Amino acid sequence: MTEAGMTESAESLVRDGRGAMGWAERAPMSRHFDLANQKDYLAWRDEKLARYPRSVDVLKVALGDIGCPSGEEKARITDLARRANMAIYMTTADAASLADASPEALRPAMRAFGRAFELDIAEAHRSAENEGIVAIEVADTPAKRGFIPYTTKALSWHTDGYYNQPEEAIGGMLLHCVRPASQGGVNALLDPEIAYIRLRDRSPALIAALMHPEAMSIPESVEDDGSVRPVSTGPVFIIDAECKTLTMRYTARTRSVFWRDDDETRAAVAMLNELLSEQQEPLILHYRLAAGEGLISNNVLHTRTAFENDGGIGRLLYRVRYTNRIAGT
């Protein structure tokens, strides 16, 4: 081991800055994400932790019109996204009632809301419907059958689209609650930059391991129509040197995920799983979206508790995902 606690392979990974899209071929890494630059990292870290919301209430922004947010509303959401990579918006009672009466009318308003933050590159998804939006509800349709999000079961920690190819990583995500469950359905939320900080503070070698281009692999999946989603292998932490941003690909699942077989990766995954699964991190926030409320984020880490539906009308959320981030973040 080196003096910094890294093996020679991890130390070389730090030196050449691999781990971003294109890895070694990319431009030089953003200074505070450069594992060899402790000074700039500590300055960024201290500011990040000082400004990070300690209460979920800080994340809330009231909207007058989801389809046309005001300049002040956009500025507040953008500021929160800079601080925590997410914000929770609350529509007016009238807007919530309208959405509940006619959920389809909400779809174009959601897309307009995304466009207000330059989130105009929606991901193509097997379950996408009108306006490229996916209905997250209990369902047994061919495109949703067998996938946990469309059941009442709990969802473990993950970022959206962790099974995508690294160059197609999900940057932004919008989740709007049309109808909450009668019980349960609570989300836990954590900015990936906080996870990065906790691991890097323990040892830069842990970050280096999770920036390796073969850190995490998701095996291929054959769809009902015979199409194949190919194997996806790439880093957990993707650093975009040009935009100076961090994107995370992660799932706490133990099935259908393979980790690089080396000591540093095992140590990094163990610490990350411990940090999340035992919820030791004090900056993890919990919230249950009510009707008319939503989460806009740069694809933060999140979970969902199991839930119960009341009668024939069940929990319904709309989700749209993007390959880019919230503008200005």
Image (cartoon, grey):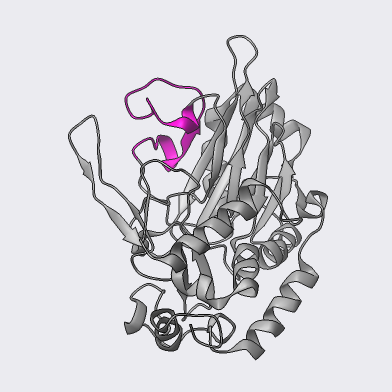
The answer to whether residue 152 is seen in the rendering is yes
Residue 246 is inside the magenta segment: no
Across and down, in percent, residue 225 comes to: 20, 31
Q: Is residue 76 left or right of residue 324?
A: right
- Residue displayed at 36% across by 53% down: 164
The answer to whether residue 298 is seen in the rendering is no
| Vertical comparison of 312 with 328: above or below | above
Q: Quadrant of the C terminus?
A: bottom right
Q: Is residue 306 left or right of residue 45?
A: left
Magenta extent: 126-150
Q: Nearer the viewer, residue 219 or 161?
A: 219
Magenta: main secondary structure: loop
| Vertical comparison of 251 with 306: above or below | below
Across and down, in percent, residue 260 comes to: 36, 61
Across and down, in percent, residue 124 comes to: 35, 47
Residue 128 is inside the magenta segment: yes
| Vertical comparison of 301 with 23: above or below | above
Q: Quadrant of residue 9?
A: bottom left
- Residue displayed at 75% across by 70% down: 49
